[in-house]
Amino acid sequence: MPLDLLSTPWALAVMSLLVLGDAFFVVIPGEIAVTALGAISASSGTPPLWAVIGCAGIAAAAGDAACYLIGRTVGTERWRWMRAARVQQALAWARRRLDTGTATVLFTARFVPFARLAINLVAGASRIHPPRYLALVFLAALGWAAYQASVGAIVATLIPGGPVAAVLVSIVVAVGLGAAIDLSTRRLRK
């Protein structure tokens, strides 16, 4: 019964809401939802993988654009939480990164939850030209969605045991890949 629910259009809507919410609250499992639906798509055929990628990409771009809009209208110091030392450090880091290459930073930040929030807020506060920003964010979001859904789909293709096993293993693989990428980038920075 629960797997039948995952192959309905409601699954795409719920996944999209999780991805959208993940733009603001990094504890929301947007990445896991995309990976899981990618696994379901590959193992059951529905929803189609292109729909998973498209919905996730649009939701991710919308969430990033909303953060940009908040940064553009509110700035980065209005609320108390924005003035906290750790938040200010993250925002200063984001400013430095955006100065060195907007496209590279927007694509990279799409894969790092806390960095993504800081980069998008600072991009708005820095008043990066909206059409350029939106084009870059949309491309980054589609790339991210294709990556997340593909991890689930590839694992589902390689792992026997049906959709449940595919979802569980694909989530573990996605988290492991994310941790490995984080570790690699930390080592490269040092």
Image (cartoon, rainbow, N blue to C red):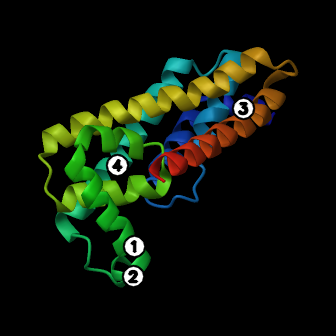
The answer to whether the residues at label 3 and label 2 have Cβ atoms under 8 Å apart is no
The answer to whether the residues at label 2 and label 4 have Cβ atoms under 8 Å apart is no
**Residue 58 spot, x, y in % from top left:** 38, 35
The answer to whether the residues at label 3 and label 1 have Cβ atoms under 8 Å apart is no
Q: Nearer the viewer, residue 76 or 86?
A: 86
Lower sequence index among marks 4 and 3: 4
For mark 2, what is the residue? 84
On screen, 160 above or below 113?
above
Q: How crowded is mark 1: few (under 14 residues within 10 Å), some or many (20 or more)?
A: some
**Residue 173 spot, x, y in % from top left:** 71, 34
For mark 4, what is the residue? 64
Q: Nearer the viewer, residue 4 or 114?
A: 114
Q: CA separation, marks 3 and 1?
A: 32 Å
Lower sequence index among marks 4 and 1: 4
Lower sequence index among marks 2 and 4: 4
The answer to whether the residues at label 1 and label 2 have Cβ atoms under 8 Å apart is yes
Which numbered disc, 3 or 1, marks the residue closer to the eye?
Answer: 1
Q: Considering the numbered disc 2 on the image, is that residue within a helix, a strand or a loop?
A: loop
Residue type at the position of mark 4: Asp
Residue 170 image label: 3
Residue 157 occupies quadrant: top right
Q: How crowded is mark 4: few (under 14 residues within 10 Å), some or many (20 or more)?
A: many
Q: Residues within 10 Å of mark 2 (few under 14, many from 20)?
A: few
Q: CA separation, marks 4 and 1?
A: 18 Å
The residue that appears at 57% across and 55% down in the rendered structure is: 28
The residue that appears at 63% across and 41% down in the rendered structure is: 180
For mark 1, what is the residue? 87
